[in-house]
Amino acid sequence: ITTTWILLQHGPRGFLTQRWKWFALRAVSVMFTAFCVVNALSRVPLADFYGIIFLSPMLLVLMSHFLLGENIGWHRIIAIITGFIGVLIIAGPQFNELSAGIIFTIVAAFFVSCNGIIIRKIRNEPVLPLYAFYPHLLNSIVYIPFIIGDFQFPATEDIGFFLIIPVFIITGFLCYSIAFSRVPETAIIAPFHYTQLVLGSILGYLLFGDVPTTATITGSAVIISAGLYLIWREHKAHKETI
């Protein structure tokens, strides 16, 4: 889809970009994110997955300090520590049973944060579909060899899902990239991340019968509270700039 889009709108030169190093780094980040997300979702319920993946807004704050030179104060440190407490609440008694899935989810949250930092470095890319093209090109190069010798055609009832997935992924990639590359402050769009927690829990219940546990709800509430506090502080501190 993205290849056709680029060729029709920009021609072969549309695949070239001066920010190719950052696009390459983002492709690597997305490749590892995909690996961790697939392995996490095969081991933990959607609600638990979303509860932990929301460490990413707070990890972004920490990474922005070390990688972008942004100041980090005690308000941010408190929010980051509180977020990890929320993850420990979710992981709590089931940690031994689902340790691999939880670890995959935490690592996925790290790479999601890396993705946000990289997009901030890319800034405005005039050829919009490149945001989705390069990550999935690398995914194809890396992962297709693993299935060539052991490929099984998807079951008939799953074909519809495989056809729908690219549309959702490309739309999500482009919207995510536009938001992070063009917004004046990351804190402005960060609250929208938390709508995924509600949607993920609802879909997990409707599609798979996953009922959020008390630990999942409590831990998620702690993580969301820490994130919203951080967002409120950032907005208050930079209100004039925004």
Image (cartoon, rainbow, N blue to C red):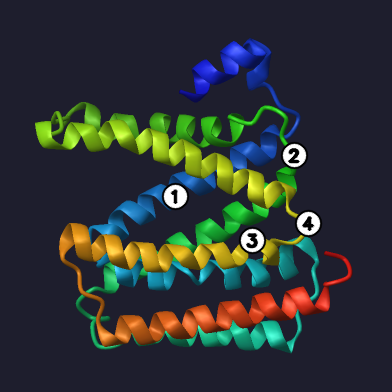
Q: Is residue 87 visible?
A: no
Q: CA distance from mark 2 to mark 3?
A: 17 Å
Dot 2 alpha-carbon crowd within 10 angstroms: few under 14, some 14 to 19, many 20 or more: some
Of the residues tagged 2 and 1, which is closer to the observer?
A: 2
Q: CA distance from mark 2 to mark 1?
A: 24 Å
Q: Where does the image place residue 217, in percent across and percent down from the top left? A: 34, 82
Q: Is residue 64 visible?
A: yes
Residue 62, by quadrant, is bottom right
Residue tagged 2: 124
Which quadrant of the figure contains the C terminus?
Answer: bottom right
Which residue occupies the extreme right position in the image? 240
Of the residues tagged 4 and 2, which is closer to the observer?
A: 4
Label drawn at residue 184: 4
Three-letter amino acid code of the residue under disc 2: Asn
Task: Kindly check if marks 2 and 1 are in contact, taking CB atoms under 8 A apart as contact.
Answer: no
Q: Secondary structure at mark 4?
A: loop
Task: Kindly check if marks 4 and 2 are in contact, taking CB atoms under 8 A apart as contact.
Answer: no
Three-letter amino acid code of the residue under disc 1: Phe
Q: Is residue 76 left or right of residue 47?
A: right
